[in-house]
Amino acid sequence: MVCSISCLTEIKSEVAHPIRLPNGDVTIATHIGNVKITENLHLHDVLFVPSFSFNLISIRKLAKTSSCCLIFSSDLCFVQDLSTWRTIGLGEVRQDLYHLVQNKVPPDSLIQKLPELTSKITISAAVNQEDFDLWHFRLGHPSDPRLRLTNLHQNSNHKHIMKLCPICPLAKLHRKPFNTKAPDQEPNPNIEISEDDQPNSEYRDQHEPPNNSYVPRRSERSKKTPAYLQDFIYQQVASLTHSQTSDKKKGIVIPSCRWVYKIKFNVDGTIERYKARLVAKGYTQLEGVDYHETFSPVAKLVTVRTLLAIAAAKGWYLHQFDVNNAFLHGSLEEEVYMEIPPGYSTDQNSDLHNKGSFKVCKINKSLYGLKQASRQWYSKLSIFIIEQGFQQSKAYYSLFVRSTGDSFTTILIYVDDIIIAGSNEKIIDSLKVLLDEKFKIKDLGNLKYFLGIEVARSTKGIQICQRKYALDILSDLGTIGVTPAKIPLDQNVKLSKDEGDTLPDPASYRRLVGRLLYLTITRPDLLYSVHLLSQYMQAPRTSHMNATRKILRYIKRAPGLGLFFPSNSNLQLKAYTDSDWGGMSRL
């Protein structure tokens, strides 16, 4: 409310609006209009009351109509714009009331006493548009002294506080993507300790926080097992002892072993469980002495896709499970010895390790790391499955089928990850019970995530994709924020084995192309481009790496793209050929 009609910059209407005062009296407002206090602070629907001797501003109406907030101190009141956090108005205390003033900057001593306010307040000449903040943003966040050298505000009493910029501390922070040495104290249980290969930091995003999954190099690894991993070690050794794998033997030169710690994740990236695995150093084994045959069949990914397509059309149930300590179930045909696992306390098994004597473990069953371990496990599992009435496929040795009456059941094996599909769910459940009694399996329920392939099922069919795998590739190479591309390969680019400079690290190119090849399981749109780039893996050049970056931009456009197998498919086999082959004579 204003006491002078000259304060109104625009009069909207004449009214006779009664106003009740705090003392109970009633006065009349005669006009309604707008008031322009500063260039950035306007008040609307202000009442003109002739009987008033002063002007009043409603805090509620000011905050609502001007999209601002007010910060009060003992001496001042700041009016802050919510979108830019500029000070568009300033009030000072006079006779215990806040009076609105213009073109006045509060003293620095007051700002220093209000640290909770300085994190948000940008002090400026209240209504000046060309302030230091604007030029600070436009010129790439220079320092305060450098900005003053530009003489952009020679005639301005402008004051700028550089520490108020929220971007500078983030953009000018330099941190290494990995630690330079292993931590001295016990690591956090959330740290992932995996295989020997340290993640490649060449493609890491510079603005990405340091990786919490630091894996120390071989020379940096502590010989003492972390305390938080002791439980996993004891569980694994208990499994080995239960499987009758530890017999003592003297006077034999034997290979050593090591622990591998792994964190297994769910599809959404959350931690499923921690894993500790004892791995023998199988590279010290001699062919013909410690092992003979090593080959073991595994499920081909084209078989997985075929099985899912048939299951969608037939309406089969799809279940999955994995086997706990799968390799420990295979019996060794050769006599193999190994050192006692590192970090295993002698107090828990004094017969296994005594001071003053050199004792070893005789491995009666296959162990992770042994060259013949996979073959022995597959042999044990396949024999048991055949005993249950299944027949092994002649084309795919990892596929087993059984047909009894109206029910059909099939098993697909990929090492210790197994898929069961069939028309009768009760038969599937009974089969899992038999497998659990024999091998101690972990039932994962309906098929959802298998070898990096995400499976989603509905009444319309089955959708498979590798979204998490694709995003992991983009994240590892620091391309998660790149601009998406519409095509995977430019038409006007002709790749050659001699064009461009040789890459200083060709192994990084080979790893990337290998990961992209695995992505083509559910992305046939990448087949031509990726297989074209795979022809230059022997001596890759910069032009080839640029082409792979184009594919990464194309993946960024739709990382969840995949294949869909409809439930109403008639399962008719269709073949296509190039018309050029029609003119060739038969051989």
Image: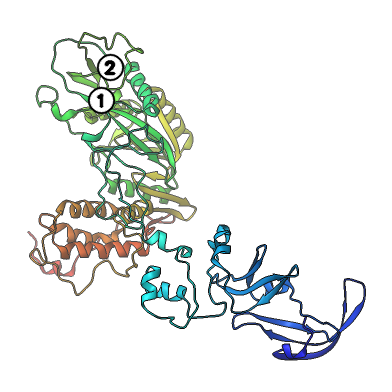
The location of residue 547, given as percent across then percent down, is: 21, 65
| Measured Cα–Cα span from mark 2 to mark 1 | 9 Å
Residue that appears at 36% across and 78% down: 150
**Residue annotated with mark 1:** 367
**In this image, 495 relative to 221: left or right?**
left
The location of residue 531, given as percent across then percent down, is: 19, 58
**Residue annotated with mark 2:** 245
Looking at marks 2 and 1 on the same chain, the residue that comes earlier in the sequence is marked by 2
Q: Within the image, what quadrant is residue 230 found in?
A: top left
Q: Nearer the viewer, residue 565 or 51?
A: 51
**In this image, 578 relative to 214: left or right?**
left
Badges 2 and 1: C-beta atoms under 8 Å apart? yes
Q: Compared to 9, does 92 lie above or below? A: above
The location of residue 220, given as percent across then percent down, is: 24, 35
Residue that appears at 78% across and 88% down: 4
The location of residue 256, given as percent across then percent down, is: 20, 23
Q: Compared to 247, does 42 lie above or below? A: below
Q: Nearer the viewer, residue 408 or 169?
A: 169
* Secondary structure of residue under mark 1: loop
Amino acid type, residue under disc 2 in the picture: Thr
Specify few, some or many for label 1: CA neighbours under 10 Å numbering under 14, 14-19, or 20 or more. many
